[in-house]
Image (cartoon, rainbow, N blue to C red):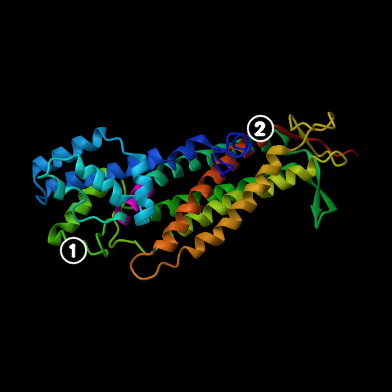
Amino acid sequence: MTISPFDHPILSGLLGDEPLAHLFSARAEIDAMLRFEATLAEAERQEGVIPADAAEAIVALLATFSPDVPALRAGVARDGVVVPALVAELRAKLPETCRPHLHFGATSQDVIDTGLALRLKSACAILLERLATVSQSLALLEARDGAVEVMAHTRMQAAIRVPAARKIGSWRAPLERHAERLERARQAVEILHFGGAAGTLDKLGAKGPAVARHMAAALGLSLVDHVRHSERDGIAELASVLSLITGSLGKMGQDVALAAQSEIGEIVLSSGGGSSAMPHKKNPVAAETLVTLARFNATLLAGMHQSLVHENERSGAAWTLEWMLLPQMVVATGAALVKAGDLVDGISFRPLER
């Protein structure tokens, strides 16, 4: 059973995005956390923090490990995070002499936040590729139909005749700016989170920075000068960019839906949704969906800004709120870009009558 429209067995046909949704699946999250633990063990071996045989045993176990998901669920109910139960299960499968060396010097937030960073890195790459695709489709539409004369509307009233390029450009230019914004925002989220209990790497002593450097390089993440457990501005900035992307796509969808109205007819849809009662209709489903997803992300963005309020060095409440909201925003943005590409490829401008 699911209550999310993004992976609902029926509604996901309209709103789903399997490649991005997969990045937020339990399997993908666990795989990312196991990658963190394996990288930690190897980095600590290189710096002589843990014995080589212990690191080898840990890495070998993690390569084939499959967790007891019901046990993890019970652990989350008890601890509020999955890592204590996950680490306990892993330690139980290790030789007794190796158990203290697993997860040494790390804390739950290191594992979860770095696992998220790894998955957001993949998500941002997908979103940037799709942004480029939609921008290119709009450029092709402008090259084909840009000279077609259409009516501009201000405050929902007919204004003056303009070339279709005027409208198409107002759809494309923001997306190109958003691609630049997303490139900047991803730099603040694709980082290693490694600070230990209270962000000081106290258990590693002088070897902490070197272990962190090894880990960042191995994971392909940036190394920041201090851990950002309670500094969530980077995550909130990414959420803001996601809302900007869907907002601009929603503007395009709204314009298309208005121009495609039967009595307006400035835009012709090559296909559309059917009606159970009126077979003549060609409903602008993709355009309407863009408006919905824009409003959805705008609503969730307020919650992401609420999650900036992390008390002291770590917050259970604000952190959990982030888990609830950010995956939906990423998937909504991905779905909107897919819908936008389909929409642009299926419209044409019809010249005004003289």
Question: Looking at numbered disc 1 in the image, what kind of residue is underneath it?
Answer: Asp
Relative placement, left or right, of 234 versus 89 is right
- Per the rendered image, the range of residues in magenta is 109-116
Q: Identify the residue shown where x is 67% and y is 43%.
A: 289
Which residue is the site of mark 2? 345
Residue positioned most to the right? 354
Which residue is the site of mark 1? 202
Q: Residue 295 at what x, y percent from top left?
A: 64, 53
Closer mark to the observer between disc 2 and disc 1: 1
Q: Nearer the viewer, residue 78 or 99?
A: 78
Near mark 2 (Cα within 10 A), the count class, few <14, some 14-19 or many ≥20, is some
Near mark 1 (Cα within 10 A), the count class, few <14, some 14-19 or many ≥20, is some
Q: Secondary structure at mark 2?
A: helix
Q: Residue 210 at what x, y percent from top left?
A: 17, 54
Q: Identify the residue shown where x is 42% and y is 46%.
A: 120
Magenta stretch, main secondary structure, is helix
How far separated are the C-alphas under marks 2 and 1? 56 Å
Q: Which quarter of the figure is the N terminus placed in? A: top right
